[in-house]
Image (spheres, grey):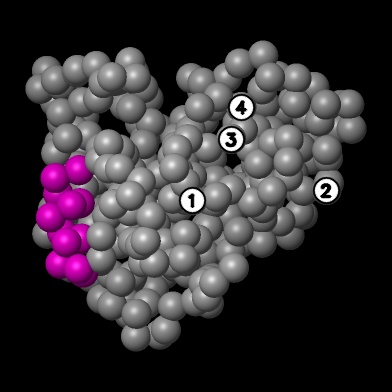
Amino acid sequence: MGNEKLTDEQRSFLLPYAYNAALRVGSAILEIYENAEDMDVAIKTDKTPITLAGKQAHRIIREYLALTHVPLLSEEGREMIYEERRGWDLYWMVDPLDGTKEFLKGNGEFTVNIALMLNNRPVLAVVYVPYVEKIYFCDRETGSFRKLHVTSDAAASFAVETIMEGAEKLPLTTEPNNPIKIAVSRSHNNEETYRYVEMIKRKFPDAEIVEQGSSYKFCMLAEGVVDCYIRTSNTYEWDTAAGELILEVAEGATRALPSKDRLEYNKISLLNPSFICKSKFMPDFL
């Protein structure tokens, strides 16, 4: 495993770009979300919906993060061939609109995911939930943080000092929930998901299920609002990189199933295996 640390200078330069990019993208997404008649839904080659919001979000994030001169691997740029990206040591891993189905349903459970990858491991991350005005960010040296009442801003240009003002360090709890709360996807569960849920319930019979869309589940784990998260349907690397780091730095963990290995990034195939996550205080359960 290579070096996975940023210098203070790199963090001070790159964190504001990730944070401000998320707020700028959030502004564009909400403008379309709140004017549903403008929604232009197409179908991608893998049959998942893509919206005008996703396209505009990708353009904004690509143009803004280009100012860092760090290459970008994005949900909307999934066709990039492995030979082109395999030698990257520093790059952005981005999903400009995670939770497209939730966006289309109108339930507000969508996020902007931005991770900075160093030697194919996330080292800095931002997850923004624009509809509820929550933003989560972290790096390996400083910690994971949450800020509330952070409105989207098409011209966001905040410096590190302002970003850190009012930020709460994660986790926010000191023990697991009672009863245990198991997070699952709102729209992407399958039989295997519920098989794992039943395994957990054998240890924790009173455990409650919490359905939630998008990478927001990682942030809820980092906070301690939920205790574990099962995902056995398809996700891609840009769906997990930012959220996984926010959880990991908050002393939680994400592991592939059934191997229990760490998730790998910048693979030939950008598809993730099934995985399971736990908060800092969740007892071992598998």
Q: Which residues are magenta?
A: 58-69
SS at mark 2 in the image: loop
Q: What's the amino acid at mark 3?
A: Pro
Going by the image, does 184 lie left or right of 52? right
3 or 2: tag closer to the N-terminus:
3
Going by the image, does 123 lie left or right of 261? left
Residues at badges 1 and 3 in contact (C-beta under 8 Å)?
no
SS at mark 1 in the image: loop
Residue for point 83% across, 40% down: 285
4 or 3: tag closer to the N-terminus:
4
Q: What's the amino acid at mark 2?
A: Pro
Where does residue 168 sit, x and y in percent of width and height? Answer: 50, 66
Q: Which residue lies under the disc numbered 1?
A: 265
Separation of marks 4 and 1 at Cα, in angstroms: 18 Å
Separation of marks 2 and 1 at Cα, in angstroms: 27 Å
Question: Image quadrant for the N terminus?
Answer: bottom right
2 or 1: tag closer to the N-terminus:
1
Separation of marks 1 and 3 at Cα, in angstroms: 11 Å
Q: Which residue lies under the disc numbered 3?
A: 273
Residue for point 73% across, 45% down: 260
Q: Which residue lies under the disc numbered 2?
A: 283
Residues at badges 2 and 1 in contact (C-beta under 8 Å)?
no
Separation of marks 3 and 2 at Cα, in angstroms: 23 Å
